[in-house]
Amino acid sequence: MTIPQLSPEKRREALEKAQMMRKERAAVREKLKAGEMTIQEALESTSEVISKMRVSYLLESLPQIGKITAAKIMEEIGISANRRVQGLGERQKKALLERVK
């Protein structure tokens, strides 16, 4: 598969969008870590930024949960390591909320 050639204008727009998404993702992580946002609010959000985050990345943003704990929680529930928030089913979301609370 070949990479499409972008005009300098399109390339700049894509880079700006990527940078904006990274900043918004960092802000969401900070809110989760500070307790200003709950995991339930994040899972119920319709935000494109949150829906495209990996579940492991979201879990690691919570206080007292690191990479190992996040991986263990996901394995117990049956969530793939590279699953994104938008790809979670209702049962997985419910199990995740029960496990993290």
Image (cartoon, grey):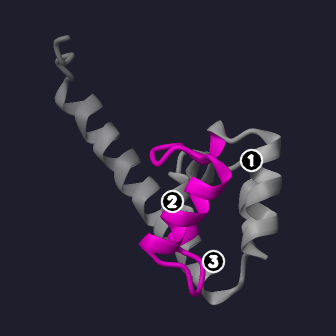
Left or right of 3, for residue 40 = right
Left or right of 40, for residue 28 = left
Residues at discs 2 and 1 in contact (Cβ within 8 Å): no
The amino acid pointed to by label 2 is Ser
Residue closest to the eye, 71 or 97: 71
35 in relation to 52, above or below? below
Q: Earlier in the sequence, mark 3 or mark 2?
A: 3
Residue 11 found in image quarter: top left
Q: Earlier in the sequence, mark 2 or mark 1?
A: 2
Q: Is residue 69 magenta?
A: yes
Q: Earlier in the sequence, mark 1 or mark 3?
A: 3
Q: Which residues are drawn in magenta?
A: 59-86
Q: Which residue is mark 1?
A: 92
Query: At which x and y percent is residue 37?
Result: 72, 76
Q: Which residue is mark 2?
A: 56
Residues at discs 3 and 2 in contact (Cβ within 8 Å): no
Badge 1 local density, few (<14 within 10 Å), some, or many (20+)?
some
Identify the residue at the far front of this view.
Answer: 76
Query: At which x and y percent is residue 14?
Result: 33, 38
Badge 2 local density, few (<14 within 10 Å), some, or many (20+)?
many
62 in relation to 11, above or below? below
Query: At which x and y percent is residue 96?
Result: 73, 60
Q: Residue at x 53, y 65 (%)?
A: 72
Left or right of 69, for residue 20 = left
Q: Which residue is mark 3?
A: 32
